[in-house]
Image (cartoon, rainbow, N blue to C red):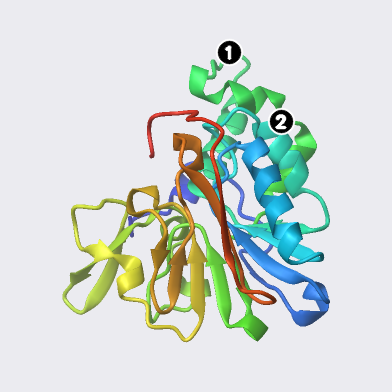
Amino acid sequence: MAEKPREARYGLPLPDVCHFELNDELIGNRSVFVVGDVHGCYDELMDLMAEAKKKEPNILYIFAGDFVNKGPKVKEVVTRLQQDDCLAVLGNHEIKCMREARNMAENPNYKLSKRYQWVKGLSSEDLAFIRRLPYTIHIPSLKSIVVHAGLIPGTALEKHCLIAMTHMRNLYLEGEKLIPTGKHDKGKAWATYWTGPEHVYFGHEVQRDKQELEYATGLDTGCCLGLRLTGVFLNGCRETLSVPAHRAYCVDDD
């Protein structure tokens, strides 16, 4: 994973801002609510937002990536996330979306697989929105970072391999250096190495369900697999909320 970055290999453009800093002026008087992997589960997202509103009336939602693919209403989710009360980071499935859209644009004979037919329903504005997404959102006043997959301890955000931020699951030692990998059978969960001082909120890891460590919280709880959709308030009431999936929409968790 530390070889040539996949974003370069895929020929995908980088956003203007890879690491976005969310300051108090932008937060205003809103409570910050971070949501795990939505994966096109729009109805469940509406359920979770409604439950959140019961706790805090004025909310800034931040999505930890992978809001597209697998579920039945990707277009509706993408449309909702473009409203002023939402921010999001890039996940590996948004990268897959951009890759498929690029392939269609470059080759009029390109055939989308059944799994990616939903890409046809996205407008140019939708795709531009996805392309602008940062890889991380740093919230200094709340001592928090939102990223899709993970971070490497001791490495500044701007020094990270970007693809590791969207794909990594584990870290393993090579000499004295921590190396990211997307596999579970080498090393151990990256979050077990993370010692702060910022608390990291992430998705991507449905296999480990909701992870709660001292300085890291995993929020992918498998909504598209028929489990639940989860979010957490970083300020205000500071509660964790989950709503059940209406049904299972897919069987794989890649």
Q: Secondary structure at mark 2?
A: loop
Q: Quadrant of residue 172?
A: bottom left
Pointer 1 with pointer 2, Cβ within 8 A: no
Amino acid type at mark 1 = Asn
Q: Quadrant of residue 105?
A: top right
- 3D distance between C-alphas at marks 1 and 2: 18 Å
Residue 232 rendering spot, x and y as whole percentages: 58, 64
| Disc nearest the viewer among 1 and 2 | 2
Q: Could you say which disc has been placed on residue 122 in the image?
A: 2
Res. 113 in view: no
Residue 9 rendering spot, x and y as whole percentages: 45, 45
Position of 139 relative to 35 (above/below): below
Q: Nearer the viewer, residue 39 or 163?
A: 39
Position of 155 relative to 252 (above/below): below
Look at 73% across and 51% down and name the residue there.
50
Residue 115 rendering spot, x and y as whole percentages: 50, 23
Q: Earlier in the sequence, mark 1 or mark 2?
A: 1
Q: Quadrant of residue 154?
A: bottom left
Look at 55% across and 72% down and name the residue there.
145
Residue ID for mark 1: 109
